[in-house]
Amino acid sequence: MEVNKSEKQIQQHKKRMQRKKAIVDASIARADKEKGVILVLTGNGKGKSSSAFGMIARALGHNMKVGVAQFIKGQNNTGEEVFFNQHPNVIWYVLGQGFTWDTQNLEQDIATAQKGWDVAKRLLNDETLGLVVLDELTYPLKYSWLEWDSVLSDINNRPTMQHVVITGRGASPSLCDIADTVTHLQDTKHAYQAGIKAQKGVDW
């Protein structure tokens, strides 16, 4: 289908794009700081962990080393874990024993979370890691299984250029406050609500 534009429309478009480019270039020029950033991916929508795992692929493309600490989730292998565990620049730990409604044991959940944080702390102290993903960390923080001040201190004392991605529903205002970037994901529609079970390669 051929779309014809008048010379006037072409010139108007060019001027709009020139103005837009000037605004974008000025914005890029103002962003001159370089530091390790904290990203929080929260909300009830699908895609929080998936987004974090996408950043792993991006980091590996730049030859960075990555550490992953998965809280809450148990030993059911996800496609991402299987795939990235084959990469020499990825260290991946599954630290949970399943969802709280599966374990039904508060003392066990607290002990598991605290042992998990000992592992996460080692990742945060590792200067060779350019990216650390703390998957589902919001839950042990929300349930007070971990001490917020200790977690905050460990995150703040990480290597200067190390980036941290934190995922999970219900991120607290305190967690969002320390983050450089916060994204709230929200479902408009979800297959599960229509009785469709989680699908291999899409949901896990």
Image: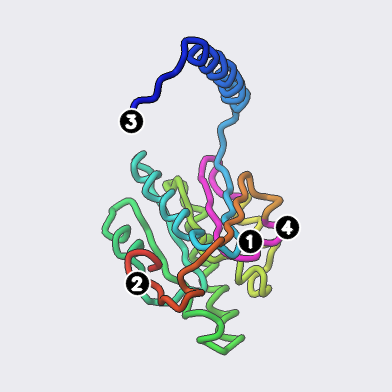
| Mark 1 and mark 3 residues within 8 Å of each other at the beta carbon | no
Position of residue 52 measured from the top left corner of the image (x, y, whole percent): 47, 54
> Label 2 belongs to which residue?
77
Instruction: Give the CA distance from mark 3 to mark 4.
Output: 51 Å
Say which label, 3 or 2, has the lower sequence index.
3
> Label 4 belongs to which residue?
173
Residue type of the residue flagged with mark 1: Val
> Label 1 belongs to which residue?
151
Task: Please name the residue shown 68% across and 53% down the image.
Answer: 176
Q: Dot 3 surroundings within 10 Å: few (below 14), some, or many (20 or more)?
A: few
Q: Residue furthest bottom?
A: 104
Say which label, 2 or 4, has the lower sequence index.
2
For label 1, the SS is helix
In-image side of 147 versus 189 (left or right): right
For label 4, the SS is helix
Residue type of the residue flagged with mark 4: Pro
Say which label, 3 or 4, has the lower sequence index.
3
Say which label, 4 or 1, has the lower sequence index.
1
| Mark 1 and mark 2 residues within 8 Å of each other at the beta carbon | no
> Label 3 belongs to which residue?
1
Position of residue 112 measured from the top left corner of the image (x, y, whole percent): 53, 78
| Mark 2 and mark 4 residues within 8 Å of each other at the beta carbon | no
Q: Can you tell which of label 1 and label 3 is closer to the viewer?
A: 3
In this picture, which residue range is highlighted in magenta? 157-175
Picture mark count: 4
Task: Please name the residue shown 56% across and 89% down the image.
Answer: 104
Instruction: Give the CA distance from mark 1 to mark 2.
Output: 27 Å
Say which quarter of the image contains residue 180. Answer: top right
Task: Please name the residue shown 52% across and 60% down the image.
Answer: 134
